[in-house]
Amino acid sequence: MKQVVVLGATGSIGLSTLDVLKRHADRFSLHTITAYRSVDKMLELILAYEPVQAIMACPDAAEQLASRLPTESPTRILGGEQALVDAASDSDVDVVMAAIVGFAGLRPTLAAAEHGKRLLLANKEALVSAGRVFMEATRSGGATLLPIDSEHNAMFQCIPANNRGRPETAGVEKILLTASGGPFRGRPRSELLGVTPEQACAHPNWSMGRKISVDSATLLNKGLELAEACWLFDCTPGDIDVVVHPQSIIHSLVRYDDGSVLAQLGNPDMRTPIAYGLSWPERIDAGVAPLDLVSVAKLDFEAPDLEAFPCLRLAQEAITQPGGMCILNAANEIAVAAFLAGGLGFTGIDNVIAHALENVSADEPDNLEAVEALDGRARACAQERIEQLEHDTRGV
Ligand code: NDP
């Protein structure tokens, strides 16, 4: 029986993970679930799954949750960020699903890597911000790092097991990273000025949290994924091409020296990569409908439009700049939060990121404290830029 921690259990990936775990209660036992401050959702999950522990990162939310828990519940309630780190490092725990959104997930995710867990990585922001520090923790801790992002999970499935991390020796000529293009695919930049958060979050194929939905709409998500693939498969941006594939049926491809191209296909449902991460190298039922190619009928491909969506280009540049992806990620998190709150336009997101990349100087951070310090500086710079843009718009 594998003991599982689900970091970010109340989110889109967290709930899909709980759904897969429920189908395999003979193999997996739910040790800990965590959230930030969604008390109602967490209470529902505790009553449905009865984990050993439930942790709210926000201590006030933990108090509220504890006061509403029926006295007969077997679940222990804890609060605060250190409790997340402790759960991810617990010697009783075998598997950690890292599904907190954003940089906030870095510490517990890193703790799971340092403690040699099977680490299912959805929280790409943690890997791209901490890059070298993260990969070093995975190596020294002896963790098994399994990508949950559907694209990287597809690459993982298409590169032979004995060559992962060294694609060049496997005869890999190119990795083809697919992108749906998001809800605004095909629109020129001039039509993106007034788009609303609701429009940006209405992804045509995937149902996801609001932050990654906006990242998908700006193509910034593809930039994070480019950096993620470079770390996971030990390659450079030049080894990877981005291809827009609007149906999201092919989740990525690997082209080999002999002309072969291997692809992984499936319905757009995150339970497939989650189940593969949980059971690898075996395969288990994920609850996903079989792919019906006749009803899909058509698979289209096109090049990304970097003029309308400059975030991908910014990421391509940031990957080559010391600490660049940490700066880009932090600026993006601040800009997306401002956009969702109505304080920044959609096209302001890339403006804020470009400004932070130009104005925050850095060396490649080589420990957690340096990563956090750089993240903090980039956030402050992004915030200043947003205030300046707001000021200019008002004409004050
Ligand atoms: P959601 O917004 O749906 O869920 C986020 C989860 O993180 C919630 O449980 C939330 O708790 C928790 N959380 C938020 N802020 C904090 C914090 N400061 N401290 C601790 N916990 C926090 O996100 P998604 O599930 O969509 O995405 C999760 C991660 O997976 C992201 O990194 C995303 O890029 C990645 N991913 C997601 C995919 C998807 O299909 N959704 C696909 C591929 C990757 P609360 O509910 O209390 O706020």
Image (cartoon, helix red, strand yellow):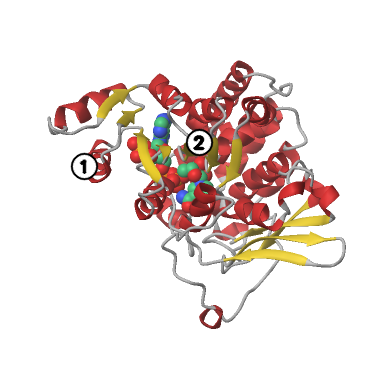
Circle 2 Cα neighbour tier, 10 Å, few/some/many (<14 / 14–19 / ≥20): some
Identified by mark 2, the residue type is: Gly
Q: Residue at x 73, y 37 (%)?
A: 319
Give x and y (percent) for residue 52. 30, 32
Between disc 2 and disc 1, the foreground one is 1
- The answer to whether residue 66 is above or below residue 238 is above
Label placed on residue 295: none
Task: Tell me if the residue at label 2 has its CB under 8 Å from ligand 1.
Answer: yes
With 30 as the anchor, is 282 left or right in this view?
right
Give x and y (percent) for residue 84. 41, 26
The one nearer the camera, 88 or 342, is 88
- The answer to whether residue 122 is above or below residue 52 is below
Which tag, 2 or 1, sits closer to the chain's start?
Answer: 1
Do we see residue 274 in this rendering?
Answer: yes
Q: Residue at x 42, y 38 (%)?
A: 4
**Kind of element beneath mark 1:** helix
Residue 166, by quadrant, is top right
Q: Which residue is mark 2?
A: 102
Q: Residue at x 67, y 48 (%)?
A: 312
Do we see residue 341 in this rendering?
Answer: no
Q: Which quadrant is the N terminus positioned in? A: top left
Give x and y (percent) for residue 35. 35, 35
Identified by mark 1, the residue type is: Leu
With 182 as the anchor, is 324 left or right in this view?
right
Q: Which residue is mark 1?
A: 47
User: Can you name the residue that lies furthest to the right here?
Assistant: 258
